[in-house]
Amino acid sequence: MLKRNEQAKQRWGGAHAAVDTWLQERQAMLIEYFKLAGLPPYEREAHALPAAQDITHFCELLMDYISAGHFEVFDTIIRNSQKAPKSTRELADEIFPLIGDTTEIALDFNDSYGEVTPESELNGFDRDLSNLGEALELRMEFEDRLLNTLEQHQLL
């Protein structure tokens, strides 16, 4: 996922201020995801859960990333573009519900873990984090398809 985001930043960085900000938010969120999950290059003690403040911070970044995608990137660039060809609008209409499905998973994760305390029970955290990771991977594929289409039609 981090490699995908780095490739996206190299490809579409500098094309539009909203896209730049959003890709930075995506990267910050992914780094924190990798830390929580204990994925390389970050490690987590076996069977130890992350600190409550780290989970809360991640949830904040996750919500920033989700919101920026919906309200700054997709709406502003695609929906409001008068120059977008019909095929781009059709792709957006196809992909937006799929992105919406991943949004629901992210919102559910945030509802469960966004306000944890050191005393909180975190039963199922690793499972939920893994499910979120799968949803984020799909979401990034959908987002990158949209960005690619926007680039092809010179809307970025």
Image: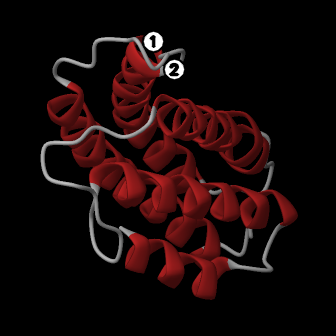
Give the amino acid type for the residue marked by disc 1 in the picture: Asp
Q: Taking 138 as reference, is 17 left or right?
A: right
Image location of residue 135, percent across then percent down: 28, 41
Q: Taking 126 as reference, is 142 left or right?
A: right
Q: Residue 15 versus residue 118: which sits nearer the camera?
A: 118
* Quarter containing the N terminus: bottom left
Q: Residue 90 versus residue 14: which sits nearer the camera?
A: 14
Q: Which residue is mark 1?
A: 111
SS under mark 1: helix
Q: Which residue is mark 2?
A: 114
Image location of residue 124, percent across then percent down: 16, 22
Q: Residues within 10 Å of mark 1 (few under 14, many from 20)?
A: few
Give the amino acid type for the residue marked by disc 2 in the picture: Gly
Image location of residue 143, percent across then percent down: 48, 55
* Quarter containing the C terminus: bottom right
Instruction: Say if mark 1 contacts mark 2, CB within 8 Å.
Output: yes
Residue under the image location 79 percent in, 40 percent down: 80
